[in-house]
Image (cartoon, rainbow, N blue to C red):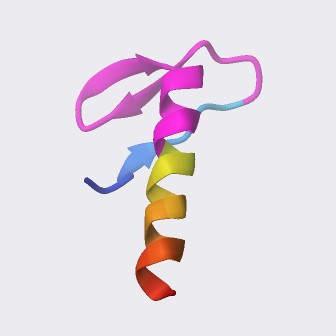
Amino acid sequence: MTLDARAPRPREERALFEGLWVEVPTYRNARRLIERARELARA
């Protein structure tokens, strides 16, 4: 999974991700999970 998405702008309720609109909290949670996985992979 990559985050090739248009990040949400301030006050936006959704972000465009792989052609789908997702709720901002879902988008941000996915970003955190992916970054954490990358950190663990480097360790």
Q: Residue at coordinates 34% horizontally, 35% vertically from top-left?
A: 17
Point 41% across, 19% down: residue: 22
Q: Nearer the viewer, residue 13 or 25?
A: 25
Q: Position of residue 30 (x, y in %)?
A: 46, 40
Residue drawn 23% across the image and 30% down it: 19
Q: Residue 43 vs residue 11: left or right?
A: left
Q: Indicate whether 13 appears above or below 18.
A: above
Q: Which residues are magenta?
A: 10-30
Where does the image place residue 35, in percent across and percent down from the top left?
52, 61
Tell me residue 14's x, y (percent): 52, 18
Name, please, the residue furthest toward the bottom: 43
Q: Is residue 24 visible?
A: no
Q: Is residue 35 above or below residue 3?
A: below
Q: Is residue 42 above or below residue 19?
A: below
Query: 14 or 26, which lies in front?
Result: 26
Asked which quadrant contains residue 12, the reply is top right
Residue 10 visible, this angle = yes
Q: Residue at x 54, y 61 (%)?
A: 36
Q: Position of residue 20 (x, y in %)?
A: 27, 23
